[in-house]
Amino acid sequence: MNLEKEWDVIVVGGGPAGLRTAIKCAEKKLKVLLLEKDQELGSPVRCGEGLGIGWFNRLGIKPKPEFAVHPINGAVLYAPSGKELVVRFDKISGYIIERRMFEKFLAREAASKGARIIAKTTVTDVIKEGEQIIGVKAVHAGEEFELKSKIVVAADGVESVISRKAGLNTTNNLYHVDSGFQYEMAGIDFKHPDLISLYFSNKYARRGYLWIFPKGKDYANVGVGILGSDEKTAKKYLDDWLETQPGLKKGSKIVVNAGCIPVGGFLEKMTLNGLIIVGDAAHQVNPIHGGGMGIAMEAADVASEIIAEAIEKKDFSDKFLSKYTSRWYEKRGNKLKDILKKRKMLEEVSDKDFEVLVNSLNGEDVLKIAHGDLIDSAKTITKKLIKNPKLVTLMVKYLK
Ligand SMILES: Cc1cc2nc3c(=O)[nH]c(=O)nc-3n(C[C@H](O)[C@H](O)[C@H](O)COP(=O)(O)OP(=O)(O)OC[C@H]3O[C@@H](n4cnc5c(N)ncnc54)[C@H](O)[C@@H]3O)c2cc1C
């Protein structure tokens, strides 16, 4: 490999977390190398490809037509009976993106800022000097080599072999892993091409939901996310549900993708001497809807700030790098823990009770519940209690 042997930062993995880390470290004039095991950045895709407008704004990413392929104006939630609850905004609330293109866009940005990216290169282990991680071992086209770096970033996705090899057991509790399965479908009929459609039913998606994320008026990602340890597979849930949807059933399946989603089980420890973990590898995902791209990129921003400080102070110790953990919890992690509590309540809601909720709430209420804290959410529901005695029974049951 014609590569320099010493780097400030080596990033393992070229997903949103790794690429954003590379961009931000390169902006800070650090010498950064990103190694990706797959032969093409952005492929294969394991994602519904939905990204809210808030993330574009917070991260300062312009939704370019090359990757932001379909604007979304809100969501429609379907109760088990098929009753709809429409949450529509008067402006764009997000995009369905083409991750193949998005990751290439991020990679080009990283490269143009000075980062070096090499695809088809698997990092097989870390190199240690005592307790300090000082580099990685990697393989490219059958050739094994070693590289040194001041800091290694494990952005290698949900399995994060690198974190484990470094000495941190990041294995997720099965309760906190969802299993996702999705078809990219063409030639389909569905009702709301400007909204994402979410279907809730314990029969068709136990502890989860089915989705239609439109990429055009007859073209969409159609998928399901369920409890990973369910005895029935996510594929079987999706196939069974598609049989009940004539407009979808007739369509073509042009891409099939599947993957695990770490929905909770946040890591108390996300650093070691010379190592920082970012993105799915650190379980940084919204525990209710399973979205992780925005959260991964935001965490990468926090990580790169700490990396730059560490390099300036020449302190790559776990103690110094662990500032990343506390800053991330302040910025995002604590909110996600709150969302995890809401998920635990939602998990208990039976199909029958869900029906009562959908009949009692409107789109605005749903937004308040989704964005507010537990007290705000309880207040929103309490206002409705006066009008609907059935909700009183529900409140007592679930808040107990
Ligand atoms: C079915 C499904 C649907 C989803 N839908 C959405 C959605 O609609 N919106 C959303 O925001 N999120 C969604 N997610 C979650 C989202 O895909 C992840 O949260 C996001 O990809 C996390 O980014 P990451 O960079 O941390 O990890 P990844 O995207 O997994 O990237 C990790 C990268 O590391 C590479 N790698 C792994 N090991 C090594 C190694 N040893 N050496 C070198 N490279 C390595 C991998 O090849 C990969 O490219 C979904 C997930 C699934 C499974």
Image (cartoon, rainbow, N blue to C red):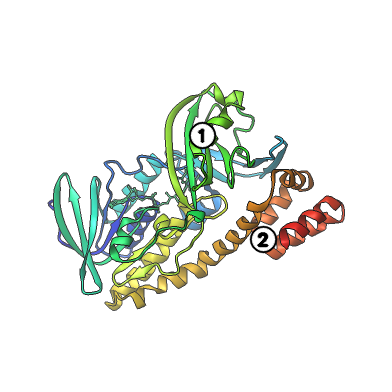
- Where's residue 18, x and y in %? 35, 55
- Where's residue 241, x and y in %? 58, 32
Of 109 and 392, which appears nearest the observer? 392
- Give the numbered dot on residue 372: 2
Q: Nearer the viewer, mark 2 or mark 1?
A: 1
Q: Amino acid at mark 1?
A: Lys
Secondary structure category for the residue under label 2:
loop
Q: Is residue 17 visible?
A: yes
In the displayed structure, 85 sits above or below 271; it is above
Q: Is residue 214 visible?
A: no
The picture quadrant where one finds residue 204 is top right
How far apart in space, not on screen, are marks 2 and 1 (Cα)?
35 Å
Q: Residue furthest front?
A: 231
User: Residue at 33% across / 59% down in the picture?
Assistant: 154
Q: Identify residue for label 1.
A: 236
Of 286 and 367, which appears nearest the observer? 286
